[in-house]
Amino acid sequence: MTARPPSAAVLVLHGGYETGLAAPAPGPLNLPGLRMLPVSRAVSRAVSDDSKVRVQRVRYTHRGWNGPREDPLHDALRVLDDLRHEAGDVPVVLLGHSMGARAALHAAGHPLVRAVVGLAPWCPPGDPVTQLSGRDVVLLHSTRDRVTSPLASQSLTARARRAGARTCLVTIPGSDHAMIRRAGVWHHLAATLVRGLLGQGPVPDRVAAALDLPAGARAADGTIALAGLPAGPGGRFARRSCQE
């Protein structure tokens, strides 16, 4: 039986390497892919009330970003084009980790993309932000990350806000780039944010307030410490949805 087209989608983009033309390692040998499996499962559970939401992994042709080739960006755009051909103009949230978050941010100009959730994103200073105009962008970053920079994430949220995006950065102390320490926090926050940004539930009220900041707000104003944000399964969230 042919599956019905989805009414919305979450595309999951795992991490990778700065350079690498080889194909990603298969199955359990693909460590960046394994890191996103529990996050994907948490998101799938969060949107399980709506069977028409598809949670789909973007499969990479190459394991690296590869400079101006931007290989994972083209992989993401190809999946978005295929989804549009199949289902029409359905809302999409891009969920990426590290290099995958960079690809998600670059791909956000695609007509289907409503929002980006970036986990420990790789945000080089010269990366473009104009494609983020009109999108919701929420980045999560450990203050102890030694692979990608939380300060670079904060800078990107400010630049993107000036370019017309609605942005927020949540800092997670005591964790790491691989999201192993305090793993449950990453999983729960990612799932809650994705569900809310799809318009299917609430987002934390402080995140909603940051998304509503004016374009000229300071970078620090759009940065939220985890201590001020309920993150556990029993935490209370504001009754606010990002559905338009």
Image (spheres, rainbow, N blue to C red):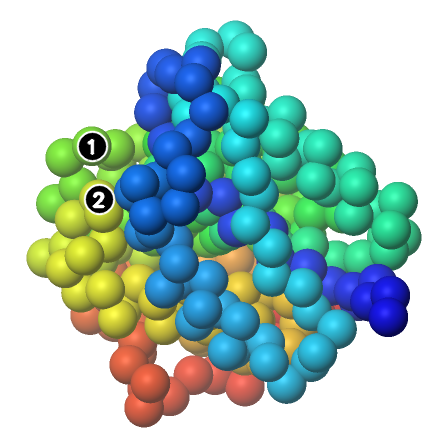
The N terminus: image quadrant: bottom right
In the rendered image, residue 42, in percent from the top left (x then y), is placed at 43, 71
Dot 1, how many residues are within 10 Å of its Cα: few (below 14), some (14-19), or many (20+)? few
Query: How far from the left and from the top, in percent, is residue 52?
Result: 75, 73
Q: Is residue 191 left or right of residue 220?
A: right
| Residue positioned 63% across, 85% down in the render | 49
| Quarter of the C terminus within the rendering | bottom right
Q: Are marks 1 and 2 in contact (CB under 8 Å)?
A: yes
**Mark 1–mark 2 distance (CA, rounded to whole Å):** 6 Å
Q: Is residue 6 left or right of residue 179?
A: right
Q: How many marks?
A: 2
**Residue 102 has which mark?**
none
Amino acid of disc 1: Val
Q: Secondary structure at mark 1?
A: loop
Q: Is residue 139 above or below residue 164?
A: below
Mark 2 closeness class: few <14, some 14–19, many ≥20 residues within 10 Å: many
Residue plotted at (68% across, 59% down): 9
Q: Residue at x 55, y 21 (%)?
A: 71
| Residue highlighted by disc 1 | 147
Q: What number is the disc on residue 177? A: 2
Q: Amino acid at mark 2?
A: His
Q: Residue at x 53, y 18 (%)?
A: 70
Q: Position of residue 121 (x, y in %)?
A: 37, 39
Quadrant in the rendering for residue 31: top left
Is residue 172 visible to us here? yes
